[in-house]
Image (tube, rainbow, N blue to C red):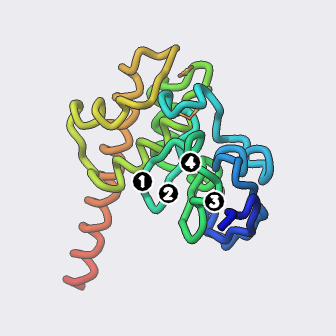
Amino acid sequence: MKEESSRTISFTLNGEPKTAAAERSWTLLYLLRDVLGLTGTKYGCGTGDCGSCRVLIDGEPKPSCIIPAFKAEGCSIVTIEGIEQAGRLSIIQQSFIDAGAVQCGFCTPGMIITGTALLASTVHPTEQEIRNAFSKNLCRCTGYVNIVKAVELASQRIRKIQEESEFLSEVRNEA
Ligand code: FES
Ligand code: FES
């Protein structure tokens, strides 16, 4: 049986339901950038090696340049545009700025996607865990030292928020 060359796909994009017509030949990156206008995700190598096109697919960081658009069907996809929280930069985005981990910025969306996934699964990663997580994100500018620092800073900030929240909850329970 001949496979269809185009189809309508339905998925969740940055928390909202989305339906889009897609061609079999399209990558997910093409759908996101060129069809849906979400240009925060970057095209680097096109071969799955540099990490600049990473998006979260069902919570996992994946290279959208080598994933067919058809594969988005039924998935939850988060791009860099969906990482902000209530119109403000997320903790990891702000930490990248504060730690000086952004230079030309081309790799940064993919880095933020990877860092977000890492901190969602491991809130307080070791330096080695951070370096392992970023092993498929290439940066030509920063040398990675400040990227590691940025993730550590974000981790410390998350820990502080958790501790404050636990403290407040103890105070409430004692009241
Ligand atoms: S552009 Fe997708 S991994 Fe490089
Ligand atoms: S900041 Fe330029 S490639 Fe990473």
- Which secondary structure lies at badge 1? strand
- Which secondary structure lies at badge 4? loop
Which tag, 2 or 4, sits closer to the chain's start?
2
Tell me the kind of residue under disc 4: Ile
Which tag, 2 or 3, sits closer to the chain's start?
2
Q: In the rendering, which numbered label is found on residue 67?
A: 4
For disc 2, the marked residue is 57
For disc 1, the marked residue is 60
Q: What is the number of callouts on the image?
A: 4
For disc 3, the marked residue is 70
Say which of 174 and 46 sits in front: 46
Rendered location of residue 79, percent (x, y) = 60, 51
Q: Eyeballing the image, is 140 above or below 24?
A: above
Q: Are marks 2 and 1 in contact (CB under 8 Å)?
A: yes
Residue depicted at 24% across the width and 37% down the height: 129
Q: Are marks 2 and 4 in contact (CB under 8 Å)?
A: yes
Question: Marks 2 and 4, how far apart in space?
Answer: 10 Å
**Category of crowding for the residue at label 1, using alpha-carbon neighbours closer than 10 angstroms: few (below 14), some (14–19), many (at least 20):** some
Question: Marks 4 and 1, how far apart in space?
Answer: 13 Å
Residue depicted at 56% across the width and 71% down the height: 74
Question: Marks 1 and 3, how far apart in space?
Answer: 17 Å
- Which secondary structure lies at badge 3? helix
Camera-side mark, 2 or 3: 3
Camera-side mark, 2 or 4: 4
Q: In the rendering, which numbered label is found on residue 14?
A: none
Which tag, 1 or 3, sits closer to the chain's start?
1
- Quadrant where the C terminus lies? bottom left
Rendered location of residue 161, percent (x, y) = 34, 57
Q: Is residue 32 visible?
A: no
